[in-house]
Amino acid sequence: MIKPLGSRVLIKMKEGEETTKSGIILAGSAQEKPQIAEVIEIGPGEIIEGKQETMNVKKGDNIIISEYAGTKIKYNQEEYIIVKQDDILAIVE
């Protein structure tokens, strides 16, 4: 498994809808790009001015991230993104 370092978070994007509410199937390019992701793993946080930074998310949280945030990686045929905690905009409850 991948274990992020510092204040980084390993996430997996949620799949977008492939059909509209009226039942129309959308082509891949017509689908909205989702910005909601699931937290897979979190780093330990960083030490800032001698104090341990608190991580604000936990495994399993659904989050909203900046559109172009993070570094995409492929691991065991799965696509993930590693983002800094600062790139996380909100937790979806």
Image (cartoon, grey):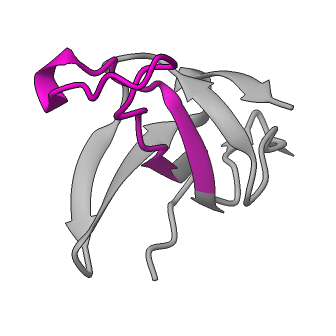
> What secondary structure do most residues of the magenta stretch adopt?
loop
Does residue 50 sit above or below 90 in this rendering? below
In the image, what residue occupies the spot 19% across and 16% down? Answer: 30
Answer with left or right where residue 4 lies relative to residue 18.
right
Q: Is residue 13 magenta?
A: yes
Of 40 and 93, the residue lying toward us? 93
Q: Give the left or right position of residue 46, taking residue 15 as reference.
A: right
Q: Is residue 55 magenta?
A: no
Would you say 75 lies left or right of 13 here? Answer: left
Q: Position of residue 41 (x, y in %)?
A: 61, 63
Extent of the magenta region: 11-39
Percent across and percent down for residue 33 are 33, 22
Looking at the image, how many numbered discs can be counted on the residues? 0
- Residue 2, image x and y in percent? 44, 74
Q: Nearer the viewer, residue 38 or 3?
A: 38
In the foreground, 28 or 50:
28
Question: In the figure, 73 relative to 16: above or below?
Answer: below
Horizontal and vertical percent position of residue 36: 55, 31
Q: Residue at x 77, y 29 (%)?
A: 92
- Vertical order, 90 against 83 (above or below): above
The structure residue drawn at horizontal position 50% and vertical position 61%, both measured from the top left corner, is 4
Taking 76 as reference, is 70 above or below it?
above
Q: Nearer the viewer, residue 15 or 71?
A: 15
